[in-house]
Image (tube, helix red, strand yellow):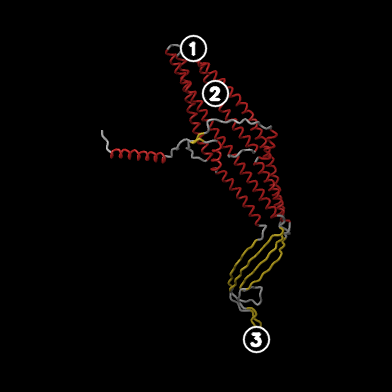
């Protein structure tokens, strides 16, 4: 077959169009565009940036800060402007009959009334209500900031749990896949021996059953990886079908653990929830003073500027715009309000008592949380050390048993036991690695020393 230039260009055109169409089809189908390897630090950054919970928590901080401005504004002079127009009914003008001198009109009827007023008011003393409200707003703002930090720490712990969960699923899948290969190799050897009459059919059936069980574990491991990816993607805010992967190995940092008393002291000083509750207690205590303000007189300075037509302060009234002003001091004192202030004070005092009780209960819960996570970390360190030795022993045992089996010096069941023991040891080691990382992160969360991503 001969090709001319036109045929070559036609083939090239078909190839390019087909390639572009295939790429567009893949893109429109929503398929993941390649695997993405995330470090733990990257996952934390993405999760913190995309978190709706943190966004909502930060909104509470901004709202609490705005509340400070609102309360402090009440302590400053307020300037208000009022304007009004009133139409009055027609009445006879006010006149005086002077006898022989005739009648004199003293005040004419002006039906159209206009009034413009500018008022300035400055609180001088409000029974400590405004100063107490200002302190309460500041305490609540600081509490909101600490609660935001606590939410941030919890999110970091959740991301770490999901990240190491995917790491564990991947590592267990590797272990299970290798076990399937081992059992396959074992089955091949047994089949050869069966053909030579060196093993019984029952021995071969045992290995086939073991292989079927290994393949079932392989299916479970695959599903665990998929679910772990979905969980991590959901927490960090990535598309659920994103093909993410963790790092291959954990760089263990075996740091010395403080004793329980030191951990508890650190938590009482740094735990965001405790710091937030401490601010809430202070705010509740200040609320008592604010509630008692009704027992004190209220003192204000005021000033008014009036521009009216007619201006009622000018006599005789004229249908003209005239301005006047006034300044003064206003004192008010609530002599009797059916113990409303007393009831408000009682409510504030009980809220203060509840806040103190909540703070004490939270301290007890923190102590219990630290105790549990401290013991888990100690146990995880010990299990990690034991699991490393267990893997080394199981690997050596499998190697020796496999060599002996190939030489016909040990039973088939011995090799099966060695394969199962190696699978168990390696799985336990992966679990121990992840348990240690999670125990360390949980203890950091408990004492309020959760590190933010760099």
Residue drawn at x 62%, y 50% as measured from the top left: 65
Give the quadrant of residue 187: top left
CA gap between label 1 and label 2 equals 25 Å
Which mark is in front, 1 or 2? 1
- Residue 47 x, y percent position in the rendering: 54, 40
- Residue 21 x, y percent position in the rendering: 37, 40
User: If the image is split into quadrants, where does the N terminus sit?
Assistant: top left
- The label number, if any, that marks residue 102 in the structure image: 3
CA gap between label 3 and label 2 equals 125 Å
- The label number, if any, that marks residue 424 in the structure image: 2
Which residue bears the numbered disc 1?
A: 408
Upstream in the sequence, badge 3 or badge 1?
A: 3
Upstream in the sequence, badge 1 or badge 2?
A: 1
Q: Count up the numbered dots.
A: 3
Upstream in the sequence, badge 3 or badge 2?
A: 3
Residue drawn at x 59%, y 37% as measured from the top left: 157
Which mark is in front, 3 or 1? 1
- The label number, if any, that marks residue 248 in the structure image: none
């Amino acid at each position: 077959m001969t090709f001319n230039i036109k045929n070559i260009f036609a083939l090239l055109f078909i190839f390019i169009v087909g390639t572009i169409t295939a790429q567009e089809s893949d893109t429109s189908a929503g398929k993941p565009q390649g695997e993405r390897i995330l470090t733990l630090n990257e996952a934390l950054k993405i999760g913190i940036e995309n978190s709706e919970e943190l966004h909502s928590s930060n909104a509470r901080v901004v709202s609490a800060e705005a509340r400070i401005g609102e309360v402090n504004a009440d302590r400053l002079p307020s300037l208000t402007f009022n304007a009004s127009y009133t139409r009055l009914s027609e009445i006879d003008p006010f006149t005086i009959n002077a006898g022989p001198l005739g009648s004199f009109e003293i005040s004419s009827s002006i039906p159209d009334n206009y009034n413009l007023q500018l008022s300035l008011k400055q609180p001088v003393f409000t029974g400590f209500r405004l100063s107490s409200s200002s302190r309460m707003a500041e305490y609540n703002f600081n509490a909101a900031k600490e609660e935001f930090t606590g939410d941030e720490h919890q999110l970091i712990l959740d991301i770490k749990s999901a990240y190491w969960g995917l790491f564990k699923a991947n590592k267990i899948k590797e272990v299970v896949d290798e076990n399937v290969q081992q059992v396959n190799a074992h089955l091949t050897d047994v089949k050869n021996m069966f053909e030579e009459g060196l093993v019984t059919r029952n021995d071969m059936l045992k290995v086939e059953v073991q292989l079927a069980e290994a393949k079932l574990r392989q299916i479970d491991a695959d599903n665990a990886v998929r679910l772990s990816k979905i969980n991590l993607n959901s927490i960090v805010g990535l598309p659920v079908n994103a093909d993410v992967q963790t790092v291959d190995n954990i760089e263990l940092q075996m740091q010395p653990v403080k004793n329980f008393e030191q951990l508890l002291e650190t938590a009482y000083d740094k735990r965001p929830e405790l710091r937030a509750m401490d601010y809430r207690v202070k705010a509740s205590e200040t609320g008592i003073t604010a509630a008692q303000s009704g027992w004190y007189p209220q003192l204000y300075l005021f000033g008014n500027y009036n521009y009216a037509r007619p201006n009622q302060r000018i006599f005789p009234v004229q249908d003209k715009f005239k301005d006047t002003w006034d300044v003064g001091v206003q004192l008010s004192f609530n002599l009797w309000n059916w113990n409303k202030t007393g009831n408000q004070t009682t409510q504030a005092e009980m809220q203060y008592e509840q806040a103190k009780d909540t703070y004490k209960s939270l301290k007890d819960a923190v102590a219990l949380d630290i105790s549990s996570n401290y013991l888990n970390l100690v146990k995880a360190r010990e299990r990690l050390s034991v699991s490393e030795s267990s893997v080394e022993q199981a690997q050596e045992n499998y190697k020796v048993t496999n060599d002996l089996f190939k030489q016909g010096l040990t039973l088939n069941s011995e090799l099966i036991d060695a394969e199962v023991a190696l699978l168990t040891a390696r799985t336990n080691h992966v679990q121990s690695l992840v348990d240690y990382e999670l125990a360390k992160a949980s203890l950091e969360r408990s004492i309020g020393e959760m590190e933010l991503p760099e």
